[in-house]
Amino acid sequence: MRDIRYLLTAWGNWSGSRIGTEYKAAWPLVTASSDIRPMLSDEDGETVDRAVGRLKYFDPLGYDIVVAYYKGKVSCRAIGEGMEPHRHHSVVSKVLERAEAYIAGRVAEILEAA
């Protein structure tokens, strides 16, 4: 099983390079040879995307935090300060960890079914 944080970081980069979820990526938007961001294939990206999508129904707050953190590149401290009421970054980190564990389980389940 791949490290879930690395996988979600790569998912954030993959999903950020998409024009829309209904279109396959024809080329990487960042073409610099020095770009060493982790990326996923479309197949792997769609697998993680399905797992993240299921999180939205299980834990909407966790989903929002995962998307802000991995796709939006927002820190846990900034996420907590932007919440109403304000939350301490350790609370946001705990919700993020719970969401990561859920996504790891869903990804493993999807891969086993394939």
Image: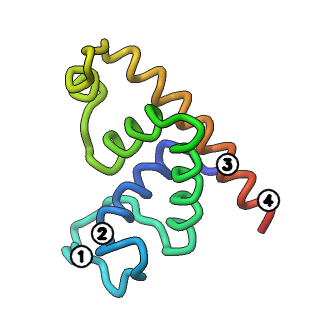
User: How far is the residue under mark 1 from the one under mark 2?
Assistant: 6 Å
Name the mark on residue 112: 4
Q: Is there a contact, CB below 8 Å, between mark 4 and mark 3?
A: no
Q: Which of 91 and 27 is in front in this view?
A: 91
Which amino acid type corresponds to the residue marked 4 in the rendered image? Glu
User: How far is the residue under mark 4 from the one under mark 3?
Assistant: 10 Å
Q: Is 88 on the left-hand or right-hand side of 109? A: left
Tell me the SS state at disc 3: helix
Q: Is residue 1 above or below residue 113?
A: above
Residue 96, percent from left and from top: 46, 30
Q: In this view, does 88 lie above or below 6?
A: above
> Circle 3: is it few (<14), some (14-19), or many (20+) Cα within 10 Å?
some
Q: Is there a contact, CB below 8 Å, between mark 2 and mark 4?
A: no
Name the mark on residue 17: 2
Of label 4 and label 3, which has the lower sequence position? 3
Which is more foreground, mark 4 or mark 3? 3
Q: Name which residue lies at 59% across and 44% down.
A: 103
> Circle 1: is it few (<14), some (14-19), or many (20+) Cα within 10 Å?
few
- The C terminus is located in which quarter? bottom right
Q: Is there a contact, CB below 8 Å, between mark 3 and mark 1?
A: no
